[in-house]
Image: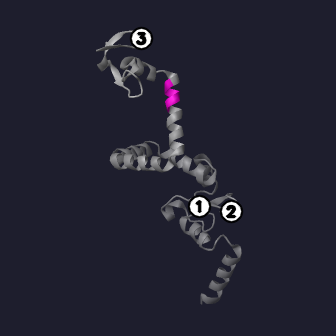
């Protein structure tokens, strides 16, 4: 049995057409080749992208499951790709982290290190003495960057909730009880 394609007008065997229960003849009106060519057009690609995007926004739970299945199936490849990217882009990664966390660039961070002569803004220990690079101290409420500190001083300020009053009370306590 042969059917005519409405697009290319050729007479082809039924094996050249996709089945379609909604048509009277039981097969699509376009041959597989014409359907494939139509799918390659930019208009069709854009239509498919919009349809996929719409489906994803309408089905967040299903999309999440899709992503989880994909990750479980391809975990090693995905993790390796992430490690490779990180190893090839360490400076870029650090720069992005500084921008995201503190709103400063890696260049600005390095300028601050030079201005402070690579010393902590509180205890004056150098990076060499501490064994680590200085960390960015910032106000957690406003996000404003203050100075660079060693990790110990930064954690200490954090434990005292950035409160000068608590720090003064702690200093007073140590003066009285450090006999």
Q: Earlier in the sequence, mark 3 or mark 2?
A: 3
Using the image as rendered, state which of residue 24 and residue 146 is in the foreground. 24
Instruction: Report the Cα–Cα distance between label 1 and label 2.
Output: 25 Å
Q: Nearer the viewer, mark 1 or mark 2?
A: 2
Q: Residues within 10 Å of mark 1 (few under 14, many from 20)?
A: many
Q: Residue 8 at what x, y percent from top left?
A: 41, 11
**Mark 1 — residue?**
119
- Which element type, helix, strand or loop, lies under badge 3? loop
Asked whether, in this view, residue 90 is left or right of residue 157, the answer is left
The span from disc 3 to disc 2 (Cα, nearest Å) is 67 Å
Q: Is residue 107 left or right of residue 41?
A: right
Is residue 45 shown in magenta?
A: yes
The answer to whether 158 is drawn above or below residue 24 in the figure is below
Say which mark, if any, is on residue 8: 3
Image quarter of residue 11 = top left
Which residue does the numbered mark 2 point to in the structure image? 141
Label whose residue precedes the other's in the sequence (1 or 2): 1
- Report if the CB atoms under discs 1 and 2 are less than 8 Å apart: no
The alpha-carbon separation of the residues under discs 1 and 3 comes to 76 Å
Instruction: Determine the image quadrant of residue 165.
Output: bottom right
Identified at 56% across, 59% down, the residue is 135
Which residue reaches farthest top?
10
Q: Say which element carries label 2.
A: loop
């Amino acid at each position: 049995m042969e059917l005519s394609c409405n697009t290319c007008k050729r007479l082809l065997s039924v094996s050249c057409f996709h089945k379609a229960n909604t048509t009277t003849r039981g097969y699509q009106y376009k041959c597989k080749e014409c359907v494939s060519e139509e799918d390659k057009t930019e208009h069709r690609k854009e239509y498919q992208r919009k349809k996929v995007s719409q489906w994803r926004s309408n089905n967040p739970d299903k999309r999440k499951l899709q992503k989880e299945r994909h990750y479980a199936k391809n975990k090693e490849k995905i993790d390796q790709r992430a490690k490779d990217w990180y190893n090839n882009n360490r400076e870029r990664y650090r720069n992005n982290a500084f921008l995201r966390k503190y709103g400063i660039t890696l260049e600005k961070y390095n300028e601050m290190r030079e201005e402070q002569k690579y010393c902590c803004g509180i205890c004056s220990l150098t990076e060499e003495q501490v064994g680590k690079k200085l960390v960015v101290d910032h106000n957690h409420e406003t996000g404003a960057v203050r100075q660079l500190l060693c990790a110990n001083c930064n954690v200490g300020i954090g434990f005292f909730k950035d409160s000068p009053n608590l720090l003064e009370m702690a200093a007073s306590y140590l003066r009285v009880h450090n006999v």
